[in-house]
């Protein structure tokens, strides 16, 4: 019996090959999309879960609001971690990181840049799960000038992991002895450890500076200590250690500061929340965004629901033509339960065919998803241990639901009426069928609006005046390797034809890293005039090189030696300080500084953040060199810069690394760019699947109303009139979807735009375009089938009468 059902199901699928292909591939596309999104979301949610103590690890983030200026960074005083472990038994261990980021490492005659380096306390190996291949984690970082390296670094430099006691020369100055090799850090980690140097005595001079946030601190709570208690401990420690110094500077304690609307606190951020929920702009590695994860989850569900609705519509449309088959079967003795099982088994079998194709589609598209999201997700059986069962259950459910109409409705027909062609019109005009189509197009319009708004915001960002000119600006890294030759190299670069200007700095508007320092309007500590300002060290060439504008006073001048004790402010800082005019304006920090100029506000970092108050100090901070070029031969100019760089003394073999500032600017919005691309893909898929659903519905309606169309034609109805009659019913459904989707999409996308301090207006044109696309797709989809029905010879539909 089951074999017979299977044969009949295959024959029916083959008999209606085109219809079956649309049905199967429509559901397959939805299942494949859902599978890819599930893999992406699972990868995002798995960050840092490889750590055995993930539920007990916290990072301490500074969060201050003092006199209108905000300080929000992943940093603490040097002594905070050790003091918490000493004074609070709930804290089991701590680790501090310093100088996270790049380092120069000697490899033969060549010097290369390693990206994932840091200085760390020995507690790192008690807190994080970093298995040793060789070496002892207890003593590995106990001595100065020692380093623990990853397996990939060991093989890169020594082609082996048997490297204990060997040395690496780093930063062109210091030899470090290798005391351990650890396994490579998993991809799903917000930190990657390739070279971990011992902290040594780096913290000694900072241990009594409680108001200097210089280190990144992680703590390990003892088992059973809740997160709420950890935050209480951090609050108690802040009050105990930092409040005395804060009071001496501000003239008020933490409670008094809060009464004036400010705050001074440190937050304990769970390790498992850092990748997706951190709001810091200075993370070592780009993080994710929990909002985008939710968006992708909702999108995946919507795509799958649209595909399922499409599958049910097409299954129902095809079943309408099988009423006579049901009548014949019942005359020949088939029982209702056999017919029910037959239709349901066919539907479930079709759904499983769709699942097999979906897995193939997902496997084919996975490399594209990895390239788009900068991930390395694999479709391995270990990934499918729970995803595949969910998809199988989904297929069974969809198959049962889609097969329920022909199974229970058609199997209940009386054979005499069915064979005379007098069967019911089924679900024609039913609220359920119409509701399904409205849902399809509501979801599709939501995605269309989302795509358009994301695109519009990105265009707004690219075209807005950022306050500086990022076009043809080369950012040269590794300037520190030039040592005392950096200044002469800068002058040589300026002489190259096509070079407008060059400047050395440690601060770039395309970087999210911000160094914040405290300044006061008066020399008296405790007067309440303390301000937290973002501190940028620049040279006299920085403002003209970046094409920024001095709106008051003047820029630094090499001809004025007194400018070593002078500063510039951006407009935001000047406004907060009340320094609109610059006569006898001073600021105090580690000395007295004369305010000589005000720089027009510019976006420092992404437009998600408001422009911070910035103070510019004169200093040759040799981290980057920004070089403004005006030439049609960029390649040739860059080659000349490289030649001069490597011709400097002792620079043979040093890496020449550079980027262009416009590329760095675009990189800051890479997550939004990817979101827009993914939204576009999903919107196209949603349109395709929804169009299939409409095609199924119009096919069903044309079959059900064949006699009505024939009678209308006999009575003189025109083809145009019949096409209009059938089309307007579907257009009504699309209009209802537009009315539902428009306010809903406005609310959702307006909420997304709130993440940007500087954002575009959504505008009515976005909704008009989305509505026109939805209507156009509907008309194009139904036109072929409706016109075919209108052109049909009425004799064929009326001959039974």
Image (cartoon, rainbow, N blue to C red):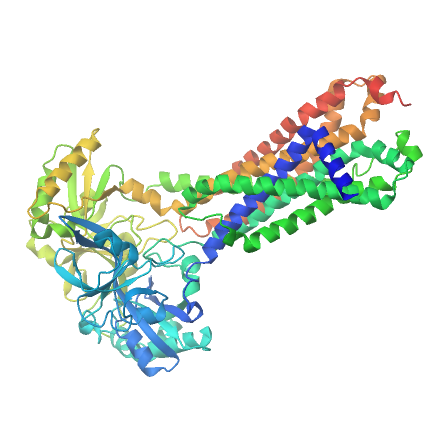
The answer to whether residue 81 is left or right of residue 221 is left
**798 and 414: which is toward the camera:** 414
**731 and 176: which is toward the camera:** 176
Q: Position of residue 729 (x, y in %)?
A: 73, 32
Is residue 729 visible to the viewer in this orientation of the structure?
no
Q: Residue at x 52, y 36 (%)?
A: 765
**144 and 720: which is toward the camera:** 144
**73 and 10: which is toward the camera:** 10
Q: Position of residue 772 (x, y in %)?
A: 59, 32
The answer to whether residue 363 is left or right of residue 796 is left
Q: Is 799 above or below relative to 293?
A: above
Q: Position of residue 45 (x, y in %)?
A: 47, 57
Q: Is 144 above or below relative to 342?
A: below
Quadrant position of the C terminus in the picture: top right
Is residue 607 visible to the viewer in this orientation of the structure?
yes
Q: Is 709 above or below relative to 546?
A: above
Total labels: the figure holds: 0
Q: Is 686 above or below relative to 17?
A: below
Quadrant position of the N terminus in the picture: top right
Q: Residue at x 74, y 28 (%)?
A: 726
The answer to whether residue 678 is left or right of residue 467 is right
Q: Position of residue 324 (x, y in %)?
A: 85, 31
């Amino acid at each position: 019996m089951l074999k017979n059902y299977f044969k009949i199901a295959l024959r029916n699928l083959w008999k209606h090959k085109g219809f079956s292909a649309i049905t199967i591939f429509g559901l397959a596309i939805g299942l494949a999309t859902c599978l890819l999104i599930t893999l992406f979301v699972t990868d995002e949610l798995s960050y840092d879960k490889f750590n055995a103590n993930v539920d007990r690890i916290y990072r301490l983030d500074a969060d201050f609001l003092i006199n209108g200026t905000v300080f929000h960074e992943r940093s603490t005083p040097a002594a905070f971690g050790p003091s918490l472990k000493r004074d609070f038994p709930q804290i089991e261990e701590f680790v501090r990181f310093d100088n996270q980021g790049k380092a120069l490492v000697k490899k033969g005659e060549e010097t290369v840049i390693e990206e994932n380096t840091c200085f760390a306390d020995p507690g790192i190996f008690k807190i994080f799960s970093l298995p040793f291949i060789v070496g002892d984690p207890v003593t590995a970082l106990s001595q100065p000038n020692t380093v623990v390296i990853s397996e990939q670094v060991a093989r890169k430099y020594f082609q082996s992991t048997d490297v204990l006691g060997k040395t690496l020369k780093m930063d062109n100055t210091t030899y470090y002895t290798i005391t351990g090799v650890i396994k490579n850090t998993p991809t799903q980690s917000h930190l990657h450890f390739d070279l971990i140097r011992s902290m040594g005595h780096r913290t000694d001079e900072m241990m009594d500076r409680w108001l200097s946030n210089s280190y990144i601190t992680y703590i390990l709570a003892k088992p059973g200590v809740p997160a709420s208690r950890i935050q209480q401990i951090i609050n108690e420690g802040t009050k105990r250690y930092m409040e005395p110094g804060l009071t001496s500077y501000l003239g008020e304690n933490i409670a008094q500061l809060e009464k004036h609307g400010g705050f001074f606190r440190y937050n304990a951020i769970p390790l498992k929340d850092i990748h997706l929920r951190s709001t810091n702009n200075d993370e070592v590695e780009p993080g994710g965004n929990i909002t985008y994860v939710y968006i992708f989850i909702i999108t995946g569900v919507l795509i799958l629901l649209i595909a399922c609705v499409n599958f049910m519509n097409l299954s129902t449309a095809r079943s309408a033509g099988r009423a006579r088959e049901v009548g014949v079967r019942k005359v020949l003795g088939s029982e209702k339960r056999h017919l029910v099982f037959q239709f349901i088994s066919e539907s479930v079998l079709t759904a499983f065919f769709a699942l097999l194709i979906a897995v193939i589609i997902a496997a084919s598209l996975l490399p594209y998803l990895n390239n788009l999201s900068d991930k390395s997700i694999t479709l391995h059986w270990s990934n499918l241990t729970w995803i595949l069962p969910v998809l199988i259950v989904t297929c069974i459910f969809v198959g049962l639901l889609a097969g329920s109409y022909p199974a229970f409705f058609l199997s209940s027909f009386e054979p005499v009426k069915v064979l005379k062609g007098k069967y019911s019109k089924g679900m024609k005009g039913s609220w359920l069928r119409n509701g399904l189509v409205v849902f399809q197009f509501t979801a599709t319009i939501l995605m269309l609006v989302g795509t358009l708004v994301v695109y519009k915001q990105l265009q707004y960002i690219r075209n807005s005046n950022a306050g500086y000119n990022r076009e043809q600006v080369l950012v040269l890294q590794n300037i520190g390797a030039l040592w005392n030759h950096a200044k002469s190299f800068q002058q040589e670069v300026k002489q190259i034809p096509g070079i407008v200007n060059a400047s050395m700095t440690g601060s770039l508007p395309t970087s999210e890293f911000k160094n914040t320092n405290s300044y006061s309007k008066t020399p008296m500590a405790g007067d309440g005039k303390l301000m937290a300002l973002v501190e940028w060290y620049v040279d006299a060439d920085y403002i003209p090189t970046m094409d920024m504008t001095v709106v008051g006073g003047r820029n630094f001048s090499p001809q004025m030696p007194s400018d070593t004790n002078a500063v510039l402010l951006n407009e935001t800082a000047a406004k907060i300080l009340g320094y609109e005019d610059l006569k006898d304006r001073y600021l105090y920090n580690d000395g007295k500084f004369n305010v000589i100029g005000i720089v027009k506000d510019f976006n420092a970092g992404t437009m998600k953040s408001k422009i911070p108050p910035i103070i510019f100090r004169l200093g040759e901070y040799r981290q980057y060199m920004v070089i403004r070029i005006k030439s049609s031969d960029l390649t040739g100019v860059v080659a000349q810069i490289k030649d001069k760089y490597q011709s400097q003394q002792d620079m043979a073999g040093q890496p020449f690394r550079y980027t262009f500032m416009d590329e760095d600017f675009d990189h800051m919005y890479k997550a939004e760019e990817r979101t827009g691309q993914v939204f576009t893909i999903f919107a196209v898929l949603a349109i395709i699947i929804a169009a299939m659903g409409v095609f199924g519905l119009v096919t069903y309606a044309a079959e059900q109303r064949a006699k009505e169309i024939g009678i209308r034609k006999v009575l003189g109805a025109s083809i145009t009139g019949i096409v209009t009659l059938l089309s307007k019913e579907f257009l009504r459904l699309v209009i209802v979807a537009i009315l539902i989707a428009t306010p809903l999409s406005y609310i959702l996308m307006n909420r997304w735009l709130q993440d940007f301090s500087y954002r575009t207006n959504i505008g009515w044109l976005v909704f008009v375009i989305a509505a026109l696309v939805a209507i156009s797709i509907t008309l194009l989809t139904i036109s072929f089938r409706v016109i075919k029905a209108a052109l049909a010879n009425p004799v064929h539909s009326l001959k039974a009468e």
